[in-house]
Amino acid sequence: MPSKPKGGLRPRPRVGKPQGALPFISPAPFSQLPFPPTRRPSVLQEPVLVLNATFEPINVTAVRRALMLVLKGVAQTEEHNHAEVHSATSAVRVPSVIRLLSYRHIPQQTRALSRKNILLRDRNICQFCGKHFPSSELTLDHVMPRSRGGHSSWENLVACCYDCNNRKGNRTPEEAGLQLVRRPRPFTLHTSRQLMRLIGRQDEKWRKYLFY
Ligand SMILES: [Zn+2]
């Protein structure tokens, strides 16, 4: 029996040479980056901005992984770092910005719901008093209290200082006379871009790709 034509399947737009299957680029590296960076990590762990084939910034990865993508021919270096890494036979300049050679469709990025990621999203700012705190002085608050059916979700969890947390207790912000600084949202590509900009402030070479 002849196979039916596959309707509705259209090839994805490609830019540049098709390279076969792209390795999965994990959105995780953000959480592995020191934030805010406190001391200079080893060169192989330094952040590298990853651009799509269209020059759209899509991720931040570490030098080690960026070099692997370049060596495999999946990406090319757009900007170099100050440093070189040496193998037995050659020296390679360290990338600061790489670009994928094939266009990659980026699904809505979602991240693990964790205390660390909530604090990262809220930039360590208590979402009720608007003040900045070190992570150790922040807790997570359920905007709609759990005892009243509030879920543990991106939309219902916010960074909160202990004072505001005590003040709010088992009440909604309205009942406690508190107001949210920002409506909590899931970690999206938009949030990622904001973080890329924050990290990018330290690397001049990222600017032209991020501050558009
Ligand atoms: Zn507070």
Image (cartoon, rainbow, N blue to C red):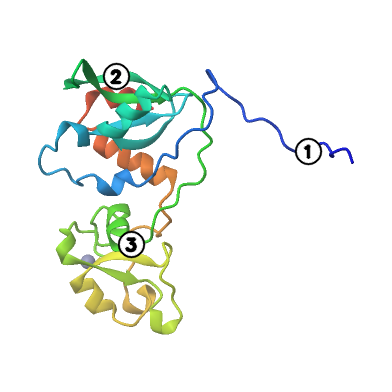
In what element is the residue under mark 1? Answer: loop
Label 1 Cα neighbours within 10 Å, binned few <14 / some 14-19 / many ≥20: few
The quadrant of the picture occupied by the N terminus is: top right
Answer with mark 3 or mark 1, whichever residue precedes in sequence: 1
Query: Image quadrant of residue 145?
Result: bottom left
Residue farthest along the left direction in this orientation: 39
Q: Nearer the viewer, mark 3 or mark 1?
A: 1
Q: Residue 46, relative to residue 34: is it above or below?
A: above
Answer with mark 2 or mark 1, whichever residue precedes in sequence: 1
The quadrant of the picture occupied by the C terminus is: top left
The numbered dot on residue 79 is 2
Q: Estimate the x, y position of residue 98 in percent, counting from the top left.
A: 35, 25
Marks 2 and 3 sit apart, C-alpha to C-alpha, by 33 Å
**Is any atom of residue 210 visible in this view?**
no
The numbered dot on residue 114 is 3
**Is any atom of residue 192 visible in this view?**
yes
- Residue type of the residue flagged with mark 2: Glu
The numbered dot on residue 6 is 1
The numbered dot on residue 154 is none
